Image: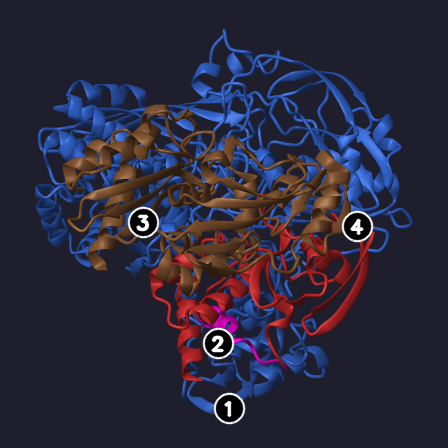
Chain colours: A brown, B red, C blue
Amino acid sequence: MYPAQFEYHKASTVQDAVALLGRLKDDAKLLAGGHSLIPAMKLRLAQPKHLIDIGKVPGLSGIREDGNSIVIGAATTHWALESSSLLKQKLPILPEAAALIGDPQVRNMGTIGGSLAHADPAADYPAVVLALGAELKAVGPKGERTIKVDDFFKDVMTTALGPDEVLTEIRIPAPASGTVGAYKKFPHPASRFAVVGVAAVVTLDAKGACQKASIGITGAGPKATRAKGVEAALQGKTLDASTIQAASEKAADGIDIQADLQGSVEYKRHITKVYAKRAIEAALARAKKS
Amino acid sequence: MSKIRMTINGVSQSHEVEPRLLLVHYLRELVGLTGTHIGCDTSQCGACTIMMNGMAVKSCTLLAVQADGAELTTIEGLARNGQLHPVQEGFWEKHGLQCGYCTPGMILSAVQILQRYPKPSEAEIRHQLEGNLCRCTGYHNIVKAIQYAADKMAQK
Amino acid sequence: MATATKLFGASIKRREDPRLITGKGNYVDDVKLPGMTYASFIRSPHAHARIKRINTAKAKSAPGIVAVYTGEEVKTGPLPCGWLLPGIKIPPRPVLAQGKVRYVGEPVAIVIAESLYAAKDGADRVEVEYEPLPAIVNCEKAHAKSAPQLFDDVPENQSFDWSIGDKAKTDEAFKSAATVVRQRLVNQRLIPNAIEPRACMASYQPATGDLTLWVTSQNPHVHRLLIAAFVLGMPEHKMRVIAPDVGGGFGSKIFVYNEEVAVSWASKALGRPVKWTAERRESFMTDAHGRDHITDAEMAFDQGGKIIGLRVKTHANLGAYLSTFAPLVPSFLYGPLLSGVYTIPTIHCQVWGVLTNTAPVDAYRGAGRPEATYLLERMMDLAAKTLKVDPAELRRNNLIPADKFPYQTPVAFVYDSGNYTVALDRALELVGYKQVRDEQERGRKSGRYIGVGISTYLEACGPAPSQVAGQLGAQAGLWESAGVRVHPTGMVTVFTGSHSHGQGHETTFAQLAADELGIPYEHVEIVHGDTAAIPFGMGSYGSRSACVGGSAIHTSVQKIIEKGKKIAAHLLEAAEGDINFSDGKFSVKGSPDKAKAWGEVCLMAYLAHNLPQGMEPGLEATSFYDPVNFTFPFGAHIAVVEIDPETGHVKILRYVAVDDVGKMINPMIVDGMVHGGIAQGVAQALWEWGAYDDNGQLLTGTMMEYSLPKADQLPSYETDRTVTPSPVNPLGVKGAGETGTIASTPAIANAVIDALQPFGVTHIDMPLTPEKIWKAIAASKKN
């Protein structure tokens, strides 16, 4: 219930934070909203000897357009994403997913960067950023680098970020015209984490056939992944009910699903397929609206 | 030890604290405001909800040092000059509490709901209460209390 | 003469609320004392193990540590079990483990420090070496020679073997039955989770020998008696127990727990206050759990669809030790409830109370009655399917008719009053039964699966006539106390042995007393929760506060009115029999202007200048009200649900509750009780489960795994009343605290199974998770 002792450092810039990480290495963790880290520290699952607070580093939060991309500061809160009129207009799948994270109080503090860096296998954003083909900018001792989201999630709570890097930005290339997306989630009744969450981003051509599909799945396995089988089964096809159904059958392929109190492997495979189908259908419904 | 300074219910507070001190413990033990309660270990129950810089947050999931420089409102600071906030009034009028333990956090969450959604539907209210657990009321009258407050605030 | 608005029956706002809505409540963890120390407990990580060695040296030298104690030092009497059944085995339950641990979370040592965090850090430095032993968590499997034995002298882990009813007669009835319905039923373990965790602070004053214990208790006097006399071995009158604002109990705060004794012992040893507040994880592991029955039930019907017999065999999980009232719950609060609202000529019930390596089990909202009602209502629905009869009609044909009261059941109880058919009809009307069934029909044709679940229930509350309780094994009386003290200015203080931890007694008891005295509500103050102020009381549980506690208040008020009449008669120079008392005025019958106001009489009682010959001054009365019977609230709940066949998710479309709790002091508060009870009962049907793995590790040990219901999972409830006053007490009240929980679990379970009827599903054990529902559908599709 109470964290173990640690030393507290306030970073005033990203460079500050990078330098501190470089000095303190594995003994240090970054603190943004703290709503993944502090619960872990209270249960003593995490016991960092040093905390580097980047919560007040200027320029790390905000949502803006940059040419053809949307750029989101890593320290942007879920509430800011949930309530962003820019995102509702340009990338509604993001505020849709953000609104499903945790609860309102958690959303006031938790940040997209914190959530992505923490890489909880049942977090919501990973599925969405995978489906959106995001790029993640990290700053380390050697300077800035861009990590493609497909390379970002490595394993359970393990990302491509180095121990001395700070995630600073999430950049989402503007989707091609005719692109719609939706996020569907089966929340754990107690924790409200995703037992399974599917982000479906589909680009339809002028005739309404699927030009491109990008499906991100979270919750089912040790990390969020793209459902390549589903994507391939949708590509180039008219998305009628039977096509969607057949494609969704592949949603659980390649995911190492573990049984728990919420379900056996068999059930979790099944609902992964169901939620894939529902996410695709919901994305299409958005297309019909616009 | 870290030196922190913040305004709580309009009063300036300053203390030296261990960095690991949770904000809720800071409020209850050092500042002496025991109206904010602790109900769980895993940030589910919301009994610890306060307002920080105008937003409802779970004070059990914040370090006191994170609140340095912030403006906080706890349940004790919600009524002004003896005048209850319409949400407090609603909870009283509509029997929105029984044991009272979840109530401070529930009330502050409700204040935020009405700040953001002045005319919430029942479904919206229930969805926005995801972060607050009550074991006594079954939520029925809490919804009624918030609807009462919404109506009252709409009249002003 | 104008009558003031009647307070009894009025839905007035609560007096408790102003302090609670402004953060000025006074809960145990809020209490601070100078020199206060903080305790943290070291607990067993194993479900079953021998303790080989405990090393406290490192902890003792940690910063801020004041003391560390283990079972070596803390030698007290065992935590008592206050209900004995014939032949029961009650193994000793130590305050800190002695040589062996028997459930995960069992306290092994206590660390006391100058600060909260130092206590936790210090506790981490206590080293305990264990020799793990095989564990057993399933109470059926534990009931075997081959199972790991928790205690050397409790073979097959059987604490008791208890029966009720006529076995021979029941067996006969089954032989002649036209239809027998059989079902194995699991009533799964629940964890109460009041939002306020358990807490206690003990303060021993060496100079006076007084011990004060603040504790989250539903019954402070019971805590005092048991801890002082039976565990610590100190004079009862030197201990004071204060249960201030308490954040919910639901039964879990009735019992005497290890920690409360340990901090008391430690405060005595140190001469300083010692405070402990549970972390939620500790609550999960150590608050008394609820339910956990495995049952084989059989119901016999004649040709006409009338129940002719019920046969029940139940294994009841008691956990690793017997909690304070544990034996009562699966015996006398269960077996005698098995007639329910039905005419059942013969019943036999056998219960084995079995120990396992899990947290001790005891009363949790409903305590035995939810288990009985779930059984009856599931069996009725199963029978309705088998007999191809509408479930409402099957019930209607078997309800005890209204003219049969008082009604003697074949399992001891005599029901006081009831009109079950009216409640059922009202519920069917409210829900629009025919329309719902029509919608269900239409839905099934288009792939929508709607289900309707009925629960006609009865419960027994307001425990209990003390003599009967004693015969049944209670080690206590079950009366209630009320001191009513009138002050010289006519203001009144009521000292009640009941305790309010959400029930609103400060409001309702004031309504009751003010109403009977005809004085303003603001002139009556209710005091509860402090053994120093209040005569011995038995506390609040079993929905007894209105019927037993309220009746005690009534009795004391009547004594005061009687004395007041004598004084008034004397002052008015009239015969005592000629004095009327109403609306706060004593007047002479026939001459209403010959009167004395309440205030005048009260003042004279204390001035004593002109009192009847031989009368003592003062105006106060203390009563101990012993109920003559249980009371029997009843009703009908109907739930309408829809199943998503693809995922198995359940959506509650409507919830209708018609309850008869007799007369009501404050209907708004009764509604609140029903709402909260429904939420807990629904949660058992759909979400909650205190699940252990085979090694005795609690899988649902935090609020991240244990699914307490949230606002977005529940509907608003449609509630209504019938009012059949109870003839059993002077107030005509029955009790409303637990009816919601008792009725709702089977209403929802029946609705879900009903929704799945097209798939041929007849039964699924709770909690009815999406997976279970989906699996049942998938299995039926294969067949």
Label 3 sits on a secondary structure element that is strand
Q: Which residue is mark 3?
A: A181
Q: Are marks 1 and 2 on the same chain?
A: yes
Q: Which residue is mark 2?
A: C577
Q: Residue at image x 45%, y 84%?
A: B156
A276 vs C1, left or right, is: left
Residue C306 in view of the camera: no
Of the pair A202 and C566, the residue shown nearer to us: A202
Badge 2 amino acid? Gly
Q: Position of residue C774 (x, y in %)?
A: 26, 32
Badge 1 amino acid? Lys
Q: Which residues are magenta?
A: B81-93
Q: Are marks 2 and 3 on the same chain?
A: no
Q: Which residue is mark 4?
A: B18
Label 1 sits on a secondary structure element that is strand
Chain under disc 2: C
Of the pair C368 and A283, the residue shown nearer to us: A283
For the residues labelled 2 and 4, say whether their Cβ atoms are less than 8 Å apart. Answer: no
Magenta region includes residue A154: no
Badge 3 amino acid? Gly
Label 4 sits on a secondary structure element that is loop
Q: Which residue is mark 1?
A: C594
Q: Are marks 1 and 4 on the same chain?
A: no
First in sequence, mark 1 or 2: give its number: 2
Of the pair C367 and C703, the residue shown nearer to us: C703
Q: Tell me the quarter of the picture where residue C125 sits.
A: top right
C-alpha separation, residue under disc 4 versus residue under disc 3: 46 Å
Badge 4 amino acid? Glu
C-alpha separation, residue under disc 2 versus residue under disc 4: 74 Å
C418 vs A148, left or right, is: left
C-alpha separation, residue under disc 1 versus residue under disc 2: 14 Å
Label 2 sits on a secondary structure element that is helix
